[in-house]
Image (cartoon, grey):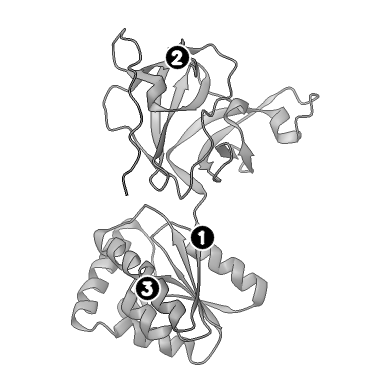
Amino acid sequence: MNTFIVGHTGTGKSTLARRLANNDGRRVISAGGWIREHTGCQTHSVAVAQHLAKTAHELLQSDPAICSRWLLNQIAGEDVIIEGIRNPFDLLSCAKAGDHVTFIESMNASSQWEDAGVGACRGLIKWLEHNGITTSIVTRNIAKLVVPIKVEVLETWLHDLDPTYKGSITGQIIALETYPGHEVTCMFMATSGGTFHDIPLEAFRLSKIEGNLDFEDRHCYSNADVGSACVELPPMDDTSCRIFSRARVECGYGKALMAVHWPDGNLLMWLVHAGDKLILWPPHKLMFGNTTDCLPDWKKLHRIN
């Protein structure tokens, strides 16, 4: 059985392929290997990636089967793992009855061309299954931060809440972990290089800024919603905001660092730095800008299917 892994750039396709290969010993083939072989370019950088993507696009326009021929030659009857499929033509040409296709869900595409190709592959699920090719969908539950956040983590959180550990460790929050129905937690990388996951926001202390937070509530307002979370920088220049509790009582102020949203579930929360704390708080409990107005009594607009 061959396994095909489909997804956007940066969604963990290579990592998943390596894990599968470690489990069963199959060889991993990168679907983008053909363009590197064709150009002789083996270096890695943003500029090189852009050049290879442009060249590949031009070659595929003149010869749509150039990649699929290369892949079939690489497979050559062997059971392998092919990661990085983004072209529906390649998927249809190479997948056969008994194979398996894994789709990694993500909202982040490196280009419109990539997004269109991955979306077209995703749309083939019913056709694939009708032709004896099994499929699975992997939701990406780790949302990489646009900019890592420098923090200290209370050491007790790194030792199963052992109270004898009273110090702190410096490092960065590098990602959020967003498992549906569970509190959003953080992936931490220490300055020393060690990593630790599933740490709640309450565990961290940031460099104190103008702002404060005075409440005993948990720092994550809502559990993660369904689907993959996206993290983006705020679209406004002034991200200062007043913070209100669940009971609509003003309890502090700070600055919004990033927006975290779940398109599939229609949920958005702001990652807010208040004093030396970090909270994940919804728009209807924040007031942005230099205003003394009260919270409006707006109601969330639910999607109409």
Q: Viewer-proximal residue, 54 or 21?
A: 21
Among the two numbered marks 2 and 3 on one chain, the one whose residue lies closer to the N terminus: 3
- Crowding near the residue tagged with mark 3, few <14, some 14–19, many ≥20 C-alpha atoms within 10 Å: some
Whole-Å distance between the Cαs marked 1 and 2?
A: 37 Å
Q: Viewer-proximal residue, 24 or 209?
A: 24
- Crowding near the residue tagged with mark 2, few <14, some 14–19, many ≥20 C-alpha atoms within 10 Å: few
Among the two numbered marks 1 and 3 on one chain, the one whose residue lies closer to the N terminus: 3
Q: Residue at x 56, y 85 (%)?
A: 79
Q: Is residue 237 above or below residue 194?
A: above
Which dot marks residue 138?
1
Instruction: State the image quarter where residue 223 is shown.
Output: top right
Residue 16 % position (x, y): 55, 64
Q: Viewer-proximal residue, 34 or 249?
A: 249
Closer to viewer: mark 1 or mark 2? 2
Whole-Å distance between the Cαs marked 2 and 3?
A: 47 Å
The residue that label 2 is drawn on is 248
Q: Viewer-proximal residue, 154 or 37?
A: 154
Among the two numbered marks 1 and 2 on one chain, the one whose residue lies closer to the N terminus: 1
Query: Horizontal placement of 61 versus 209: left or right?
Result: left
Mark 2 and mark 3 residues within 8 Å of each other at the beta carbon: no
Q: Is residue 79 above or below residue 270?
A: below
- Crowding near the residue tagged with mark 1, few <14, some 14–19, many ≥20 C-alpha atoms within 10 Å: few
Secondary structure of the residue carrying tag 3 is loop
Q: Residue at x 30, y 84 (%)?
A: 66
Instruction: State the image quarter where residue 92 is shown.
Output: bottom left
The amino acid at mark 3 is Leu
Residue 115 % position (x, y): 30, 61
* Residue closest to the far top: 292
The residue that label 3 is drawn on is 124
Query: Horizontal placement of 123 versus 63: left or right?
Result: right
Instruction: State the image quarter where residue 146 is shown.
Output: top left
